[in-house]
Image (tube, coloured by chain):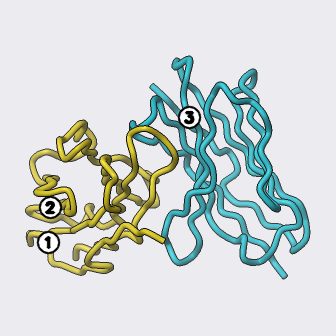
Chain colours: A cyan, B yellow
Amino acid sequence: AQKVTQAQTEISVVEKEDVTLDCVYETRDTTYYLFWYKQPPSGELVFLIRRNSFDEQNEISGRYSWNFQKSTSSFNFTITASQVVDSAVYFCAHQETSGSRLTFGEGTQLTVNP
Amino acid sequence: DARVTQTPRHKVTEMGQEVTMRCQPILGHNTVFWYRQTMMQGLELLAYFRNRAPLDDSGMPKDRFSAEMPDATLATLKIQPSEPRDSAVYFCASGFSTGTGYTFGSGTRLTVV
């Protein structure tokens, strides 16, 4: 069975610091997908990224970047120059095949202080 | 932007009462999920549908929970009878089976007293 572990329960940083959220997964699948979602204090889940296991290129989107390393089964998320609005719970998730269920990690509560 | 709409946003009910939560998926999406979020269990899958047919409801307590899609624009999750341990936020999500991410609704916060 798939398992996603986000070992960092809570992280607190000061604005403008860079912060990395860790995600480690376990799977027997040879192909799979990995996701990150953001849950701000308002409660909704906001999709950030979906990555195919075949594609190990790092991805950058503005201040967000993702480092996928299949060799270590990790899919880490870095926020550069963090802002107060980045304060949220961030979830990493695994998906066996396109269109199947998502298995979520426990989430990391990020607090960015002014 | 297209949205997944869930109603009600909040529900407080007494133990033993029936609760029905509704979800309007994004038009055209053929996959619909129900997730439950609690502090103890995190986000856990209750059920999901593909083209309105149930694919997996193994996460649901069968004796009290039921999920249906009467048509492509409506998914329902029903609890009868409700219990205090059902208190949680229930999320609906929809997407295409062929890829990209799923869009989540704002959730229904259920409190059973």
> Amino acid type of disc 2?
Lys
Front of the two marks 3 and 2: 3
Is A11 above or below relative to A22?
A: below
> Amino acid type of disc 3?
Tyr
Circle 1 is placed at which residue position?
Answer: B15
**Residues flagged by tags 3 and 2 on a common chain:** no
Chain under callout 1: B
**Which numbered marker is on residue A76?**
none
Element under label 3? strand
Question: Quick one: label 1, few (<14), some, or many (20+) residues within 10 Å?
Answer: some
Quadrant holding the C terminus of chain B:
bottom left
Chain under callout 2: B
Question: Quick one: label 3, few (<14), some, or many (20+) residues within 10 Å?
Answer: many
Work out whether residue B40 or residue B46 is closer to the camera in this orientation and state it.
B46
**CA distance for labels 1 and 2:** 14 Å
> Amino acid type of disc 1?
Met
Work out whether residue B100 or residue A66 is closer to the camera in this orientation and state it.
B100
The residue at the point 75 percent across, 49 percent down is A77
Left or right position of A65 against A54: right
Give the percent coordinates (x, y) of residue B31: 32, 47
Circle 3 is placed at which residue position?
Answer: A33
Q: Are marks 1 and 3 in contact (CB under 8 Å)?
A: no
Is B13 above or below relative to A4?
A: below
Give the percent coordinates (x, y) of residue A46: 55, 63
Give the percent coordinates (x, y) of residue A29: 52, 19
Q: Quadrant of residue B28?
A: bottom left
The residue at the point 22 percent across, 68 percent down is B22
**CA distance for labels 3 and 2:** 30 Å
The residue at the point 68 percent across, 45 percent down is A7
Front of the two marks 1 and 3: 3
Element under label 2? strand
**Which numbered marker is on residue B78?**
2
